Amino acid sequence: MNDQEFVSAPALILRSLSADPERRAIVTADGVEITAGDFATATYRLAHELIARGVTRGDTVTLLTGNTAEALGARYAAGLAGARVVTLYDGMSTPVLAEIAASVDTAVLLVDAERYAEAAELLPLIDVPTVLRLGPGPDAIGEDVIAASAHRPAEPPAVRIGPDDDLGIRHTGGTTGVPKGILSLHGPYRGVFDTSFGSAGTADEAPRFLAATSLAHLAGIFSDLTLHHGGTVVLQRTFDPSEVLAAVERERITSLWVLPPLLYQLLDHPTIGRTDLSSLRQITYGGCAASPTRIREALKVFGPVLVGVYGMSEAQLISFLTPEGHDRIAQGGQVSVGRPLPGVEVVIRSADGTELPTGEQGEVHVRSAGLMAGYWKRPDLTAEVLRDGWLNTGDVGYFDADGNLYLADRVKDLIIVVGGHVYPSEVEDLLLTHPAIARCAVFGVRDAQEAEHVHVAVVPAPGQQPELADVQAFVTARKGRIYAPEALHLVDEIPLTSVGKPDKKRLREAVAERAK
């Protein structure tokens, strides 16, 4: 597809919205319904307003936004104007957000009402040419750009976007310094819209997606696909299991995206048995390791609607496990991430680059049209993971004889102990079969001599009080002595990162604080 024929994802989404202006496109966290026509009109006008203020191809528009309709509209409008988009993630410290805003050469910072308080802390730390509000709010945060755009044309701007133009920069969850920025282009992302992935609708029913996790991450992608496929996006500010279940019943939600720890929260919620789940057509999960025990439980509760996905910002979607593919898990098997998508090549290699045969565990390498352009301003890091068109994912996995891919863990999550090494997810999977353990997170802790030790944080099952000696014996008998945790920490909840993964950095910090 050449530049003249190319239609970017934002333009494609807006075309779909404009074609059916009366349909309900968005339901805000406050229950306000927005039609497709009204949303498209506001987005086109905002794009023209950004262009009038000097935003052009190659500029960076940075968003300090929550799960709002304004956030979605701003992302699309910036894309229509030709700008690359960066979202400042909720949950990162203000100094790190300031460093990210500077590192991506922010030309315009757009702030919505959900994050005005953060903006007040951030603005003294940054030097951004233009700061604008996405709606009414404090004058100190800038002009209301939505109000200013009211007189602009309600039509697509005449900005030609090509497949090799920058789409945006997504940042990894780095623990020190500025997280790595992953540069993506319009072409690879546009390719996702040529598939049926993320639609979760039927011939007689439009999809209704519940965005209960951050739009800055995968919920944003599912929202894009839902709007493109003629559906409705229902927004929630944060993930609350009670509110999620209530929304599924109230809004007749067809599609939901969760990370495994969030899926477990739904399963453990007392209202799950009283909630009408019959509208659900697809619950997509992924992002971190999933427990076979809890997935089997989810299959019983939700039925054959689970879809497992494996992907990453550096490579988009790599593989997926269909509802039918969950049959072997239901029969006692391990959790596979399914088979690679058409057009995606996956090989397993040893540390020296040798391709490994079926059944042997090694590093997962991927080649596809969806690979990132590279790490923003970091050619050194790009060269480490991108070689000859192949991406070294940093994950450890293997293929079975049927072509299903299994992941063991991240290479960097490896805990080196005396006598061998431990992948946390393997121990977590085992511990979740213990009757006294509801949820857990296994992590490594270094001592004064830099030796690593296996620790586990445990949320006890109701009425249970697991003890270290019992847990050690349980693990030793089933996996071996080196896998047994040396310390057990009972917690009310496993802390999660802003994207919903177990926050093992916080768990380590809590251990260090107690050791003082």
Image (tube, helix red, strand yellow):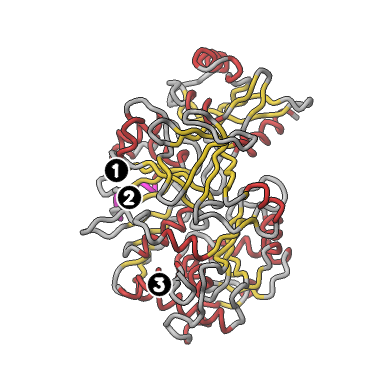
Q: Which sits in the foreground, 107 or 124?
A: 107
C-alpha separation, residue under disc 3 versus residue under disc 1: 34 Å
**What is the x, y in percent for residue 147?**
51, 80
- Displayed quadrant of residue 170: bottom right
> Which segment is the magenta one?
243-251
**What is the x, y in percent for residue 257?**
41, 49
**What is the x, y in percent for residue 134?**
53, 72
Instruction: Establish if 408 lies above or below 105.
Output: above
Which residue carries the number 3 mark? 14
Residue type, label 3: Leu
Residue that appears at 64% across and 21% down: 420
Residue that appears at 49% across and 64% down: 187
Outermost left residue: 204
* Sequence-first disc among 2 and 3: 3
Kindly indicate whether the residue at mark 1 contacts the one at mark 3 (C-beta within 8 angstroms).
no
**What is the x, y in percent for residue 103?**
70, 62
Estimate how packed mark 1 is, as few (under 14), some (14 to 19) or many (20 or more) residues with alpha carbons within 10 Å: some
- Displayed quadrant of residue 307: top left
Q: Is residue 244 magenta?
A: yes
Q: Indicate the secondary structure of the residue bearing disc 3.
A: helix
Estimate how packed mark 3 is, as few (under 14), some (14 to 19) or many (20 or more) residues with alpha carbons within 10 Å: many
Kindly indicate whether the residue at mark 2 contacts the one at mark 1 (C-beta within 8 angstroms).
yes
Q: Indicate the secondary structure of the residue bearing disc 1.
A: loop
The disc at residue 275 is 1
Residue type, label 2: Val
Estimate how packed mark 2 is, as few (under 14), some (14 to 19) or many (20 or more) residues with alpha carbons within 10 Å: many
Which residue carries the number 2 mark? 248
